[in-house]
């Protein structure tokens, strides 16, 4: 029997057109949530997958680095699936770039997508959660912050910032019934992902569980954090990485 612990809830998933976000959106829908997908790319495929499985979803094309664009999509989300109770900040980029080639432009772009977008969505979607005194924010960080991976400095710095943003926002929003947590995956292969190819051989061997992580491996943790079961869990970063960062 399918559990419906998110029945009656509405979730926003950013970056849900492909990859990890697509699977997270499907999981939340399978647990009963109506889902809005915010992505700079066309996310109709994710909507179709959810609708075919009997769920309800809508896609909204938005560049999450643009705060005005994020604000302007709030009403469309509410009209299509309802005012969100759950916000999953998943959109992110991880361009490999050698240390000597880092430019301020690349640095700012990585932070704009990976960190600032989370601030914009929190500012846009948590006011209604505060009024209802119930909300869940789940940000995707990365276990890369605990590894020595070359050519990923802007990315690693941005994901450290995600953990800091999560802790700070959790403190600010706790009194109004909103929890804010992050989840740090290991390496996950996605159709459009840009991780250096050799890492797919190396990283699983460093994990306690020596197989490649799949987006599905993250979905249960996200659904749990989004549920009533996680009411007293906030300001945490949960490593869902097969034991990669165990030492
Ligand atoms: N894949 C991995 O190995 C891995 C590991 C750890 C953490 N993560 C994190 O998980 C998240 C998802 O990663 P993924 O591998 O599924 O990525 P992906 O590249 O497969 O998909 C990212 C999605 O984000 C969207 N997006 C990018 N920039 C955007 C913008 N400005 N506005 C709106 N949407 C935008 C893309 O269109 C795409 O749909 C990211 O935050 C990433 O850093 C990934």
Image (cartoon, helix red, strand yellow):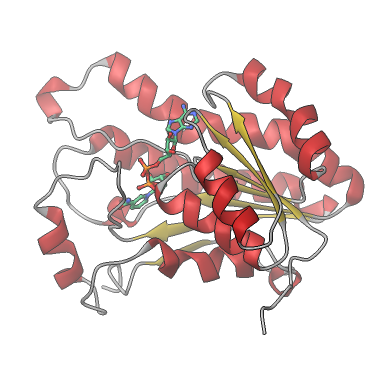
In the picture as drawn, the residue positioned furthest to the front comes out as 52
Ligand 1 is in which quadrant of the figure?
A: top left
Q: Nearer the viewer, residue 112 or 62?
A: 62
**Figure quadrant of the N terminus:** bottom right
Quarter of the view holding residue 246: bottom left
Please, is residue 75 above or below residue 227 in the view? above
Which residue lies at the image location 49% right of the left edge and 40% below the top edge?
15
Q: Is residue 181 visible?
A: no
Q: Nearer the viewer, residue 227 or 8?
A: 8
**Figure quadrant of the C terminus:** bottom left
Q: Is residue 236 visible?
A: yes
Picture coordinates of residue 119, whole percent (x, y): 60, 32
Q: Tally the numbered discs.
A: 0
In the picture as drawn, the residue positioned furthest to the right comes out as 131
Q: Nearer the viewer, residue 111 or 219?
A: 219
Picture coordinates of residue 74, whole percent (x, y): 75, 30
Picture coordinates of residue 159, whole percent (x, y): 39, 43
Please, is residue 179 above or below residue 115 in the view? below
Which residue lies at the image location 29% right of the left edge and 32% below the top edge?
154
Position of 53 compared to 174: left or right? Answer: left
Q: Nearer the viewer, residue 234 or 134?
A: 134
Which residue lies at the image location 66% right of the left edge and 50% below the top edge?
170
Quarter of the view holding residue 200: bottom left
Which residue lies at the image location 69% right of the left edge and 78% below the top edge?
3
In the picture as drawn, the residue positioned furthest to the bottom comes out as 1
């Amino acid at each position: 029997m399918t559990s419906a612990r998110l029945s009656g809830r509405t979730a926003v998933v950013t970056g849900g057109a492909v990859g990890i976000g697509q699977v997270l959106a499907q999981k939340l829908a399978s647990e009963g949530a109506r889902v809005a997908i915010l992505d700079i790319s066309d996310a109709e495929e994710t909507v179709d997958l959810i609708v075919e499985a009997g769920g309800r979803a809508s896609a909204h094309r938005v560049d999450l680095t643009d705060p005005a664009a994020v604000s302007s999509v709030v009403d469309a989300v509410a009209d299509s699936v309802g005012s969100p109770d759950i916000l999953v900040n998943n959109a992110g980029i991880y361009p490999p770039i050698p240390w000597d080639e880092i430019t301020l432009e690349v640095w700012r772009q990585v932070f704009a997508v990976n960190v600032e977008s989370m601030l914009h969505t929190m500012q846009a979607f948590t006011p209604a959660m505060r009024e209802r005194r119930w909300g869940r924010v789940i940000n995707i960080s990365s276990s890369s912050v605990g590894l020595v991976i070359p050519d990923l400095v802007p990315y690693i710095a941005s994901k450290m910032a995600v953990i800091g943003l999560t802790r700070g926002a959790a403190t600010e929003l706790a009194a109004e019934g909103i929890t804010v947590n992050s989840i740090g995956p290991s390496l996950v292969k996605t159709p459009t992902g840009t991780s250096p190819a050799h890492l797919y051989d190396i990283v699983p061997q460093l994990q306690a569980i020596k197989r490649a992580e799949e987006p599905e491996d993250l979905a249960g943790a996200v659904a749990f954090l989004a549920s009533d079961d996680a009411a007293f869990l906030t300001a945490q970063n949960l490593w869902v990485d097969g034991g990669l960062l165990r030492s």
